[in-house]
Amino acid sequence: MTLLDLILVLIIFFFTSTGFWCGLIHALGALVGTIAGVLVAGHYFETFAVKLLGLSMGNAGVAKVVAFILIFLVVSRLVGFVFWIINKMFNVIAKIPVLKSFNHIGGGILGFAEGVIVTGIALVMAGKYITTGWFVDAVAASQVAQWLLKYGQILVPLLPTSVKDIRSIWEQRAIYGL
């Protein structure tokens, strides 16, 4: 197990335990927020990245990754906030023991799904714009990263055309050992 594997497993564990603790409705909101965040960030990150070029010391790839992450976080948290309010109303009903257990277990499952999607799409985006050797080597050596990349590809159709060629880039790197 590589260091990247350990980091990715810890991130997914964090999402899973947060989903379990917060419950099904909150985790559903987080999952919907994740998908909405990918959609919005996928369409606006390049425009926002231009404004971040000064902060990234002129590195366009880093500016694009940071812009995507910032937009993604803002949108997903806004959607999550709406579901948080709905969850507060549901908590009155969720005092019933069976519903409470269902709420937590369902939240854990959706939290795991959100963690896989978030880390997978982050790896996909980073692979597109961060091409340094150490990063490529770390991802290639990581079994968890390879597994997450498969699931990150699920949301690639929601991204703009400029990002959709990511699958071929990762495949070329794997085939040619780049």
Image (cartoon, rainbow, N blue to C red):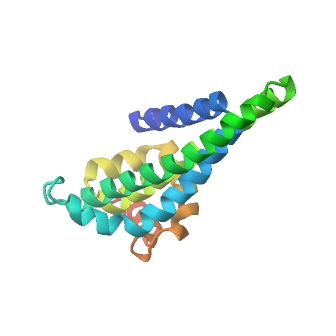
Screen quadrant of the C terminus: bottom left
Q: Position of residue 13 (x, y in %)?
A: 56, 32
Extreme residue in the bottom direction = 161
Left or right, residue 46 beside residue 109: left
Residue in view at x 59 percent, y 47 percent: 82
Left or right, residue 50 beside residue 104: left
Relative to the observer, which residue lies in front, 109 or 170? Answer: 109
Q: Is residue 109 visible?
A: no
Relative to the observer, which residue lies in front, 109 or 74? Answer: 74
Residue in view at x 64 percent, y 27 percent: 21
Q: Is residue 126 visible?
A: yes
Q: Is residue 106 above or below residue 56?
A: above
Q: Position of residue 28 (x, y in %)?
A: 66, 46
Left or right, residue 29 beside residue 65: right
Q: In terms of image quadrants, where is residue 106? A: top right
| Count of marks overlaid on the render | 0
Relative to the observer, which residue lies in front, 75 or 66? Answer: 75
Q: Position of residue 69 (x, y in %)?
A: 38, 52
Q: In terms of image quadrants, where is residue 107? A: top right
Relative to the observer, which residue lies in front, 126 or 71? Answer: 71
Left or right, residue 25 beside residue 45: right
Q: Position of residue 123 (x, y in %)?
A: 43, 52
